[in-house]
Image (spheres, rainbow, N blue to C red):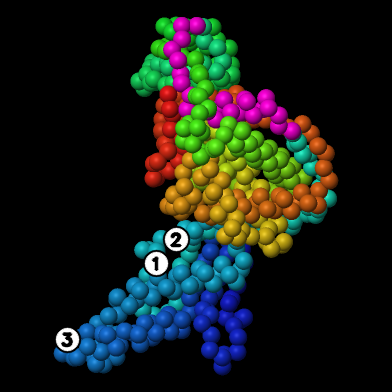
């Protein structure tokens, strides 16, 4: 465990000059690369100064029995209001001390300080000592990132690509027509899903309507050949299979084990695209013609390509700079950051033009690999943030407006509402990181050497259900139906 003791009093300016700096003794222990345990001692003279300032401010309004307001002697005011003022300045001293420690020692905090304010008492004599824990960005030497050799996915989108994407975008607006034909990929089926382990039912059966795609994912596992399993069956059939739950499944008793699943097919429907008339085009997005809609679809595909280029570059940058990213990240940190990383990823996928079905599938994939995904994302963030600091890269208000507009365009909501929802969920910092990291990657790419490779589009192969098939905790994904205030909106299902 590394430890350093630092005395701030030794670095203060001329004693004759007025200074608001606190006289602090600071001890910083480093249990790991990303953890700091900090013990701070505040000099008695600072406590007395804060008390004196607080009482001086109070004198004009102090109400002491037997005296007119503001006319009581100082000693009586101090005696009567000592506890109240002590509690007030305790908070100020703690906040000011932690801010000064962070500034003086460049701790690069990535979370709020973990401190029990109620347990700290202001002493009547002598100095104040308190301690807190802090998660920080690890210290490392940044290797030369200019001139990296990067593979860059490239693609030209034609009519067939637009047709395929159009079908997926319109999935929530078309008609689903009852069918007696055998099930095929692209059909919509309603099925009752029941799960069991060693012959015992896991919860109650649930009804779900899904689009038949090659694979079907849950929060805690994936059936890779779902399409082949269901293909050719009809209403009334029952299909059985098994699924291996992930190691950190919500139901700890079944984590890492294989369970059995039964699908009872209740209904089968074929999908028919809506008629592209002026009324529908206006409803969909104020498009004047089908050509305008197709142009918007092509723009969406281009944003998805841009996203894939950014992701490929990000992965390669991290791999090439791996010597700087060889830190052990505490499991507690990964667990705390995993939910935030999921929300950030969903927000990024939305601004990149991905349909909601793909976003749900991505979310389930992230959940199934939560710790590994979060660890990779944090390592990438630490490296990119360091480059941003060295190159003075930051987010401007126009960048926020653009990101929010892109999310609004994808969800069918207004930019004003999307911004309000992001602020309410405390995700503005995540949005800022998203902007800065993208700009840093663009900067790295400006100095990179490229090898173009074919773009292999993602999406459309996995249908996702927002539930843990093995039971356990069932928190909702941070996606919502159109018009719900609490979440980032997504289009409603129009069947």
Q: Which residues are magenta?
A: 156-181
Instruction: Determine the residue positioned at 51% across, 39% down.
Output: 286
| Figure quadrant of the C terminus | top left
Q: Secondary structure at mark 2?
A: loop
Q: Residues within 10 Å of mark 2 (few under 14, many from 20)?
A: some
Crowdedness of circle 1 by 10 Å Cα count: few (<14), some, many (20+)? some
Front residue of this view, candidates 10 and 90? 90
Question: In the rendered structure, which disc, 1 or 2, sits on the residue that comes first in sequence?
Answer: 2
Q: Which residue is mark 3?
A: 65
Q: Secondary structure at mark 3?
A: loop
Tell me if label 2 and label 3 are in contact, CB under 8 Å.
no
Label 1 element class? loop
Considering only vertical position in the picture, is 28 above or below 467? below
Q: Quadrant of residue 314?
A: top right
Where is 208 relative to 377, above or below? above
At 49% from the left edge and 36% from the top edge, which residue is drawn? 282
Q: Do callouts 1 and 2 mark residues in contact (Cβ within 8 Å)?
A: yes
N-term-proximal mark, 2 vs 3: 3
Q: In the displayed structure, does residue 81 sit left or right of residue 377? A: left
Q: Which label lies toward us, 2 or 3?
A: 3
Marks 1 and 2 sit apart, C-alpha to C-alpha, by 9 Å
* Residue 283 x %, y %: 46, 35
Label drawn at residue 473: none
**Quarter location, residue 355:** top right
Residue that mark 2 sits on: 115
* Proximity of marks 1 and 3: CB atoms separated by less than 8 Å: no
Percent coordinates x, y for residue 453 in the rendering: 79, 34
Which residue lies under the disc numbered 1?
Answer: 120
């Amino acid at each position: 465990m590394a430890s350093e003791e630092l005395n701030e009093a030794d670095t203060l300016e001329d004693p004759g000059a007025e200074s608001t700096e606190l006289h602090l003794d600071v001890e910083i222990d480093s249990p790991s690369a990303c953890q700091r345990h900090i013990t701070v001692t505040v000099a008695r003279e600072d406590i007395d100064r804060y008390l004196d300032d607080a009482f001086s401010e109070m004198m004009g309004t102090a109400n002491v029995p037997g005296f007119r307001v503001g006319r009581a002697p100082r000693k009586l005011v101090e005696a009567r209001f000592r506890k109240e003022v002590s509690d007030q300045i305790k908070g100020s001293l703690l906040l000011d001390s932690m801010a000064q420690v962070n500034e003086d020692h460049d701790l690069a905090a990535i979370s709020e300080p973990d401190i029990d304010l109620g347990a700290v008492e202001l002493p009547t004599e002598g100095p104040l000592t308190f301690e807190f824990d802090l998660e920080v960005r690890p210290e490392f030497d940044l290797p030369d990132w200019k001139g990296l050799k990067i593979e860059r996915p490239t693609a030209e989108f034609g009519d067939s690509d637009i047709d395929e994407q159009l079908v997926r975008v319109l999935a929530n607006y078309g008609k689903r027509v009852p069918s007696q034909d055998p099930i095929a990929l692209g059909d919509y089926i309603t099925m009752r899903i029941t799960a069991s382990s060693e012959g015992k039912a896991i919860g109650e059966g649930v009804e779900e309507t899904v689009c038949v795609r090659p694979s079907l994912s849950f929060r805690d596992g994936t059936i890779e050949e779902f399409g082949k399993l269901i293909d050719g069956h009809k209403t009334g059939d029952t299909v059985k299979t098994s699924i291996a739950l992930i190691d950190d499944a919500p139901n700890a008793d079944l984590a890492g084990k294989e369970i059995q699943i039964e699908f009872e097919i209740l209904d089968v429907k074929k999908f028919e695209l809506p008629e592209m008339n002026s009324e529908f085009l206006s409803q969909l997005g104020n498009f004047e013609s089908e050509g305008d809609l197709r142009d918007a679809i092509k723009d969406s595909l281009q944003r998805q390509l841009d996203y894939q280029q950014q992701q490929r570059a990000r992965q390669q940058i991290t791999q090439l700079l791996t010597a700087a990213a060889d830190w052990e990240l505490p499991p507690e940190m990964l667990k705390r950051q995993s939910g935030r990383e999921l929300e950030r990823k969903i927000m990024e996928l939305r601004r990149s033009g991905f349909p909601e079905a793909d976003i749900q599938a991505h979310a389930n994939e992230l959940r199934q690999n939560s710790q590994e995904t979060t660890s990779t994302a944090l390592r990438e963030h630490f490296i990119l943030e360091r480059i941003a600091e060295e190159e003075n890269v930051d987010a401007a208000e126009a960048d926020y407006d653009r990101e929010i507009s892109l999310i609004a365009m994808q969800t069918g909501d207004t930019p004003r509402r999307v911004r309000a929802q992001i602020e309410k969920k405390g995700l503005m910092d995540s949005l800022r990181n998203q902007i800065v990291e993208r700009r840093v990657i663009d900067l790295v790419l400006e100095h990179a050497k490229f090898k173009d490779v074919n773009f292999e589009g993602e999406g459309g192969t996995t249908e996702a259900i927002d539930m843990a098939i093995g039971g356990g905790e069932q928190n909702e994904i941070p996606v919502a139906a159109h018009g719900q205030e609490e979440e980032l909106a997504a289009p409603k299902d129009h069947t």
